[in-house]
Amino acid sequence: MDFALTPDQQAFRERVRAWLEANVPPEWTSLGSTEVPRAAAYELIRRWQGKLFEGGFIGVTWPREYGGQGLTFVEEMILHEEMALQKAPPILNILGVGMAGPTIIAYGTEEQKKRYPAKILSCEEIWCQGYSEPNSGSDLASLQTRAVKAGDHYVINGQKVWTSLAHVADWMMLLARTDPSAPRHKGLTYFLLDMHAPGVTVKPLKQITGDAEFNEVFFDNVRVHERQVLG
Ligand SMILES: Cc1cc2nc3c(=O)[nH]c(=O)nc-3n(C[C@H](O)[C@H](O)[C@H](O)COP(=O)(O)OP(=O)(O)OC[C@H]3O[C@@H](n4cnc5c(N)ncnc54)[C@H](O)[C@@H]3O)c2cc1C
């Protein structure tokens, strides 16, 4: 197997390298990740992700019509190699870019694909992952957060825990039980939940370091339109 880069891939590497040299924020390289206060780091890496989006260096493999670059995993790998070499900051919307966006592109309706992925990449909208519950970790099929159909809406009640970034998130990938009579690994529905909806309460969990990166999230009769079901 030939692992040599094609001329186009080599040109991509050079373009990435030059762009990073010009754009990695100097306050990040001089301070280093561990010395940036948590809140300041959020703002810095939020702006950084926006810059990556403007430069076309995020969502490399996502389709162009949904905000991506329509390239291959080779270009994605080149980008990550160059970012590591230049000690570039991480992105803020890690769960949106790593999980929500690819899931919406794979399974969402056309309306959902047009609405969400580009804002995930640009970091205009931050996503969190609402899977784990106080009594449901590795055994995710045991989750108890309930979504009950009421006309064209669902009404959500329950609780999530360890929800990274919920305190700054605009949207949540929410797994809730819609059919309690089905086998427990079925009867679950994936919602695109507005974190600013009435009835959503986020309580940060303070760590021994004083930081609060994870949260409890409570749902008290949260109404979600059926078009917010994935797919
Ligand atoms: C840094 C961090 C960030 C997180 N962020 C999020 C988030 O954003 N959203 C979210 O939904 N969750 C998040 N989580 C939660 C994480 O997904 C859960 O911790 C994970 O699902 C495990 O659940 P648990 O902690 O309840 O452990 P448990 O499921 O209770 O497991 C405890 C131990 O038992 C073992 N075990 C469990 N079942 C079995 C089995 N059948 N056989 C043998 N061994 C078993 C496990 O390996 C583990 O060692 C985060 C966790 C961490 C550490």
Image (cartoon, helix red, strand yellow):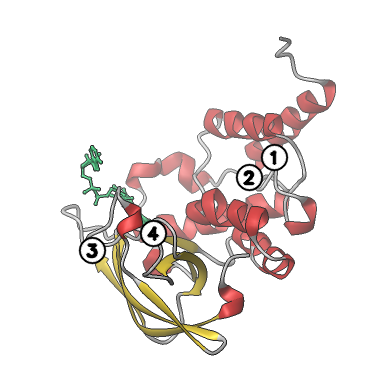
Mark 3 packing: few (<14 Cα in 10 Å), some, or many (20+)?
Answer: some
- Residue indicated by mark 4: 183
Foreground disc of the pair 4, 2: 4
The CA span between labels 4 and 2 is 51 Å
Q: Look at the numbered disc 4 and give the secondary structure of its residue.
A: loop
Q: Residue at x 49, y 51 (%)?
A: 94
Mark 2 packing: few (<14 Cα in 10 Å), some, or many (20+)?
Answer: some
* Left or right: 84 in relation to 110: left
Quadrant housing the N terminus: top right
Give the image quarter of residue 229: bottom right
Find out whether the residues at labels 2 and 1 contact each other: C-beta distance under 8 Å.
Answer: yes
Mark 4 packing: few (<14 Cα in 10 Å), some, or many (20+)?
Answer: few
Find out whether the residues at labels 3 and 4 contact each other: C-beta distance under 8 Å.
Answer: no
Q: Look at the numbered disc 3 and give the secondary structure of its residue.
A: strand
Q: Residue furthest right?
A: 7
| Residue 53 visible in image | yes
Q: Is mark 3 within 8 Å of ligand 1?
A: no
Q: Is mark 4 within 8 Å of ligand 1?
A: no
- Residue indicated by mark 2: 23
- Residue indicated by mark 3: 205
Q: Look at the numbered disc 1 and give the secondary structure of its residue.
A: helix
The image shows residue 206, relative to residue 61, as above or below, that is below
Q: Residue at x 65, y 29 (%)?
A: 78
- Residue indicated by mark 1: 19
Q: Earlier in the sequence, mark 3 or mark 4?
A: 4
Q: Residue at x 60, y 60 (%)?
A: 120
Mark 1 packing: few (<14 Cα in 10 Å), some, or many (20+)?
Answer: some
Kindly identify the amino acid type of the residue bearing the numbered disc 2.
Asn
Kindly identify the amino acid type of the residue bearing the numbered disc 3.
Leu
Q: Earlier in the sequence, mark 4 or mark 1?
A: 1
Q: Position of residue 170 (x, y in %)?
A: 49, 71
Foreground disc of the pair 2, 3: 3
